[in-house]
């Protein structure tokens, strides 16, 4: 009865719409059949890095275990002269909880990280730790610096000293963490693989450790390091990626991952990626990369076997970036076409980038409609492509992000955070190093 009535009521409305100009100008995205098969757009790694443990292309590196529910063992360690823990354990755990929530959100609920600790020591009532029995200076560690210190050698040493009953070899990753303030405000990730040189493998008493992160407890950079250790991403760095992506900005907990990374990780379905290989004009609708829905999230314009251009929807607009799998980690394998750190969002705006002419029809928080004219066809025989021009000057050597140094032994919690609401921590010089920011119902930890 109600259904019949509803049908009657709707009829006049649909007549009104079909006769209006709105219906005539309605935006229609190109059908998937008008595009290239999505599988074509899996930009491949060049031959020479095909078997590396980390990469930015397909196929993905083989890893131990599963990435839907990876388990990560947190192993504390100390030197003979390490002072007692400074930061409260609850604070360190709150960071790990946020890391888990971060990957829940980025993966649309498809990868849930679980952190476990070593067994509780009956005497200290704290998780059992590796006691190195030597002084920090014996390792020449003023602070961990992978360029001037043998950090991998240090991790190999730690793994060998683990209690066999902890079974480091059974976890997707292991975090070695210390409260020792001399060990720097940074992290480093290492991956093992069977094909690796024997001296580079990270071996626990029970077998090979899949991946390891070296970190100071409570340091949010552990989030970025797990991007390397678990999902095998490369370093991107902010001089190439502006404010976008966790692998670009490792000192903040919150930059959302590129749609490209989410496709690599298997969190985006092929049906959410629109692949273009031929010249001509096509129309597209992309919903926000952060929204958990089945809409398209990325347009990928395939240029050569090892390169392409991606477009995705962020913060109410579009961002564009080039992908080139021949460029090594840290040197800009992904480069964002930076619009003064803002996405392109104005209706009728025209964007020209790397052989593309894009015209925005409409953008809002939920999604963007746009047309794309491609002038450059996919070329399977193309030599290794030069990267699309970066808006800012690209350095020629791999930069390391700046590493703030901090004496954790005198950190005080709860001071007002300059310019932000919420709690913070400051070092002895009264410099704030971490702000807890609540916005849009989310918690972000940021370095000011
Ligand atoms: Zn990194």
Image (tube, grey):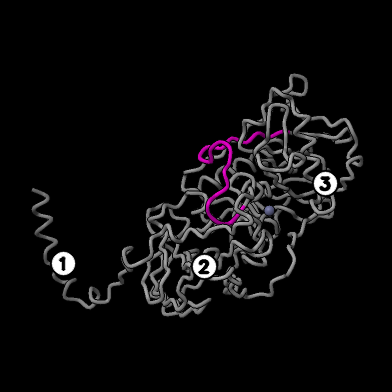
Residue under the point 77% across and 31% down: 160
Disc nearer the start of the sequence (1/2): 1
Q: Position of residue 400 (x, y in %)?
A: 75, 59
What segment carries the magenta color? 55-75
In the rendered image, the residue lying farthest to the front is: 381
Q: Count neighbours of disc 3 (C-alpha within 10 A) and say few if under 14, some if 14 to 19, many if 20 or more.
A: some
Q: Residue under circle 3?
A: 150
The secondary structure type at the circle numbered 2 is strand
Q: Residue under circle 2?
A: 304
Residue 358 placement, left or right of 17: right
Q: Residue under circle 1?
A: 13
The secondary structure type at the circle numbered 1 is helix
Q: Where is residue 307 in the image (x, y as percent from the top left)?
A: 54, 66
Label drawn at residue 39: none
Residue 111 placement, left or right of 329: left
Q: Position of residue 252 (x, y in %)?
A: 65, 54
């Amino acid at each position: 009865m109600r259904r019949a009535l509803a049908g009657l009521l709707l009829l006049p409305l649909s007549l009104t719409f079909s006769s209006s100009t709105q219906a005539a100008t309605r935006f229609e995205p190109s059908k998937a059949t008008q595009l290239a098969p999505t599988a074509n757009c899996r930009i491949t790694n060049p031959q020479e890095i095909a078997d590396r443990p980390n990469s930015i292309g397909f196929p993905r590196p083989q890893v131990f275990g599963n990435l839907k529910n990876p388990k990560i063992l947190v192993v504390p360690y100390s030197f003979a002269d390490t002072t007692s823990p400074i930061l409260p354990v609850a604070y360190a755990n709150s960071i790990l909880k946020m890391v888990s929530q971060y990957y829940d959100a980025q993966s649309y609920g498809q990868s849930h990280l679980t952190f476990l600790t070593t067994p509780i020591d009956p005497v200290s009532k704290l998780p059992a730790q590796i006691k190195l029995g030597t002084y920090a200076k014996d390792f020449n560690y003023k602070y961990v610096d992978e360029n001037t210190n043998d950090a991998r050698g240090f991790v190999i040493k730690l793994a060998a000293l683990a209690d066999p009953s902890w079974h480091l070899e059974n976890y997707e990753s292991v975090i070695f963490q210390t409260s020792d303030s001399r060990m720097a405000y940074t992290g480093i990730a290492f991956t093992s693989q069977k094909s690796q040189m024997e001296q580079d493998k990270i071996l626990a008493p029970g077998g090979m450790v899949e991946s390891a992160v070296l970190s100071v407890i409570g340091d949010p950079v552990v989030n970025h390091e797990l991007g390397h250790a678990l999902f095998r991403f490369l370093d991107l760095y902010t001089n190439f990626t502006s404010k976008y992506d966790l692998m670009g900005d490792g000192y903040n907990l919150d930059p959302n991952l590129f749609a490209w990374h989410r496709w690599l990780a298997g969190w985006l379905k092929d049906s959410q990626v629109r692949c273009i290989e031929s010249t001509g004009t096509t129309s597209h609708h992309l919903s926000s990369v952060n929204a958990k829905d089945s809409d398209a999230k990325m347009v990928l314009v395939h240029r050569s076997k090892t390169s392409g251009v991606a477009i995705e929807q962020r913060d109410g607009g579009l961002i564009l970036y080039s992908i080139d799998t021949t460029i090594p980690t840290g040197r800009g394998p992904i480069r964002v076409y930076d619009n003064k750190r803002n996405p392109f969002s104005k209706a009728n705006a025209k964007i020209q980038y790397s052989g593309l002419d894009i015209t925005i029809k409409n953008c809002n928080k939920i999604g963007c409609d746009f047309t794309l004219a491609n002038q450059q066809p996919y070329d399977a025989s193309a030599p290794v492509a030069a990267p699309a021009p970066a808006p800012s000057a690209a350095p020629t050597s791999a930069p390391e992000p700046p590493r703030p140094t901090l004496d954790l032994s005198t950190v005080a919690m709860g001071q007002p955070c300059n310019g932000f609401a919420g709690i913070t921590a400051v070092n002895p010089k009264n410099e704030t190093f971490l702000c807890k920011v609540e916005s849009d119902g989310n918690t972000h930890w940021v370095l000011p």
